[in-house]
Amino acid sequence: MANSLTKQLGRILPLRTAVRVLLARAGAALARLQPIQERVYIVTNRDSSLRGNLAEIERALRALPAAPTILRETGSDDERNGGVPILSLFTAALRIAKRSYRVATSRVVIVDDYFFPIYPVRKRSGVTIIQVWHACGAFKRFGRATLASEWGADEIFLKWVPIHSNYDLTLVSSASIAQIYADAFGQSVETVTAVFGIPRTDALAPSPRRDAAEREMRARLGLTDNRTTILYAPTFRGADLKGARAPELLDIAALHRVLGDQYRLILRLHPFVKSAMRIPDEARDFVVDASREPDVNEVMLAADILVTDYSSIIFEYSLLNRPMAFLAPDLDAYERERGFFFDYRSGVPGPVVDTTEQLITWINAKAFDLQRVANFATESFDVMDGHATERLVEQVVLPALRGEALRIPAPITRQ
């Protein structure tokens, strides 16, 4: 049977993928010989630490009077660098089998991105898998919505690895995008909900906690004077992690010449980007590189203005009701390569500019349309009360640990 399956896989899948499928299935099969453990498996392969939603959930679980058993796991160096060196192939193989085993022996599994060991196996009864996607809203195409792109999965791959399958619950920020996520994940729309809110947005709700985090971040970045802060946070370019690069679109020298006396620039490159942007010598006092700060939400708190391009950071930042602009001279090329779920120019909550000079003009004019930002936030989030993590833990995670059936409340109806 095993030899037959290996031959069948080998005919239609690259050898590496076929081996990964077999290892995931082997780990899951071994797990079925063991009882399910009453634990929460929180795992990511995109970061070296738990961040965003996963960090908020872990923090809430550990704060409980009777904290459950938590097994946490983060990405390896080779995963984050976008490839597996030859000498690490054996380790990578064992990792797939081990993770598949852990998925099938944990009562609750929580992920925030694509996680291969979940997909090529039949989900074990009694295990609840929760997807708390790392991006809010529905901006750039992802999941099965990328099948038409050069770097998306193809139909043959999907036959053996039905990506984003086996989720019992997926969190989204608004019921209006539930169908988009359901289609992108190949899930029933009834499993996609906005009623709990998004855990990582709890830190952005007005509170003493948020105020303290903002003061701490400003101090850590050395933003101790009265200059206004501009956060430049572009997404990466390239088709995969290994080739991820920062766009060279912002003229830092020009920005410094005109705005340096009154402003500071915070750089926050995408975590996939390994090389830093070149900072002109004359702008050293003007620029702060926050690319290695672990929590992008905290970096956002230190920013008075956001400049980005195609990053989903715009959804969380809109909750702060602060101005943002979009430096996107390569919009046409990016849209052909990646695609959006809405019309970019009319859908983003700020002006779209092609040059640094246009950006400077917008900043100097200070004619910021904060109502547009507020409207965008209202449309993008059904729940913004700072208690999303609490609801998810109390209404989903703890009942699942007790063996209770998952109950998803009815969608929120906007008045």
Image (tube, rainbow, N blue to C red):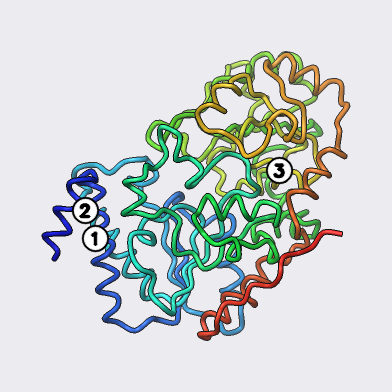
Q: In this view, does 175 lie to the left or right of 367?
A: left
Mark 1 lies on residue: 23
Q: Which amino acid does label 1 sit on?
A: Leu
State which tag comes first along the sequence, 2 or 3.
Answer: 2
Q: Which amino acid does label 3 sit on?
A: Arg
Q: What residue type is labelled 2?
A: Val
Q: In which quarter of the image is the N terminus?
A: bottom left
The kind of secondary structure element at disc 1 is helix
Q: Distance between the residues labelled 2 and 1?
A: 6 Å
Residue 89 on image: x %, y %:
21, 49
Q: Distance between the residues labelled 3 and 1?
A: 46 Å
Q: How far apart are marks 2 and 3 (CA)?
A: 48 Å
**Residue displayed at 71% across by 53% down:** 176
Mark 3 lies on residue: 218
Furthest toward the left, the residue is: 3
**Residue displayed at 35% across by 70% down:** 102
The kind of secondary structure element at disc 3 is helix
Residue 69 on image: x %, y %:
47, 78
The kind of secondary structure element at disc 2 is helix
